[in-house]
Image (cartoon, rainbow, N blue to C red):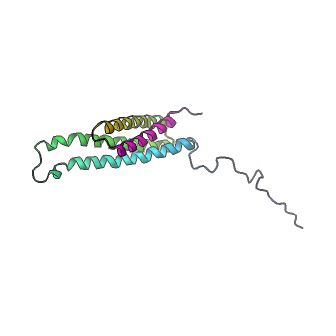
């Protein structure tokens, strides 16, 4: 016989606290951390989209071949402005998400407000895509999903601490 006693897995030393396996920062919680990551991913997607819009707008004259219209420069102003806005909003969302993960003071509030603005812009874009002929249901569905992601993220980021 041995003099050692067996250690059960339910002993106090071996038992883990609930939630100890979580990868979410303690100051956020599971749902808010997931929403923050979703905002950061969508922010990176907006940055890429903004760069693409700017590139397409700046090369607008090349699509006409040898005889572009005389106002081709004026036709590129609105897409360049929209691309810059998408670039700034996406960069702000990504930086705000990183600040929330890092625990920067008031970052939740700023990122939550930016996420709500992005949700409102997504809802407006969905309506515009469906109202202008020809309607594009695939783009409208994608914008609706993005609107829901930003809306839920803003609700989770703006809720008071428990």
Horizontal side of residue 7 vs 146, given as left or right:
right
Horizontal side of residue 65 vs 119, given as left or right:
left
> Does 155 appear in magenta?
yes
Can residue 141 be seen at all in this image of the molecule? yes
Please provide the residue range marked out in magenta.
Answer: 136-162
Which of 106/75 is in front? 75
Q: State the residue lying farthest toward the front.
A: 134
Residue drawn at the location 16% of the way across and 49% of the way down: 61
Quadrant (top left/top right/bottom left/bottom right) for the C terminus: top right
> Does 38 appear in magenta?
no
Number of marks in the image? 0
Residue 152 image position (x, y, % from top left) = 48, 38
Q: Quadrant of residue 86?
A: top left
Can residue 107 be seen at all in this image of the molecule? no
Residue 35 image position (x, y, % from top left) = 50, 43
Residue drawn at the location 42% of the way across and 39% of the way down: 147
Horizontal side of residue 132 vs 24, given as left or right:
left
Residue 34 image position (x, y, % from top left) = 52, 45
Horizontal side of residue 117 vs 24, given as left or right:
left
Q: State the residue lying farthest toward the right.
A: 1
Q: Say above or below: 148 vs 23.
A: above
Q: Main secondary structure of the magenta part?
A: helix
Residue 130 image position (x, y, % from top left) = 33, 38
Q: Say above or below: 83 vs 7.
A: above
């Amino acid at each position: 016989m041995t003099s050692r006693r067996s250690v059960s897995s339910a002993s106090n030393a071996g038992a883990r606290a609930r939630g100890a396996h979580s990868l979410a920062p303690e100051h956020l919680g599971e749902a808010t951390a997931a929403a923050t990551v979703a905002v950061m991913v969508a922010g990176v997607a907006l940055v890429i989209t903004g760069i693409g819009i700017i590139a397409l707008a700046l090369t607008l004259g090349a699509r006409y071949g040898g005889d572009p219209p005389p106002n081709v420069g004026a036709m590129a102003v609105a897409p360049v402005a929209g691309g810059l806005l998408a670039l700034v909003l996406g960069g702000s969302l990504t930086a705000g998400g990183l600040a929330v993960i890092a625990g920067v003071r008031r970052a939740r509030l700023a990122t939550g407000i930016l996420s709500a603005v992005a949700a409102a812009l997504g809802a407006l874009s969905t309506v515009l895509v469906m109202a202008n002929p020809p309607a594009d249901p695939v783009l409208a569905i994608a914008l609706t999903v993005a609107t829901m992601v930003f809306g839920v993220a803003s609700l989770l980021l703006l809720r008071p601490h428990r």
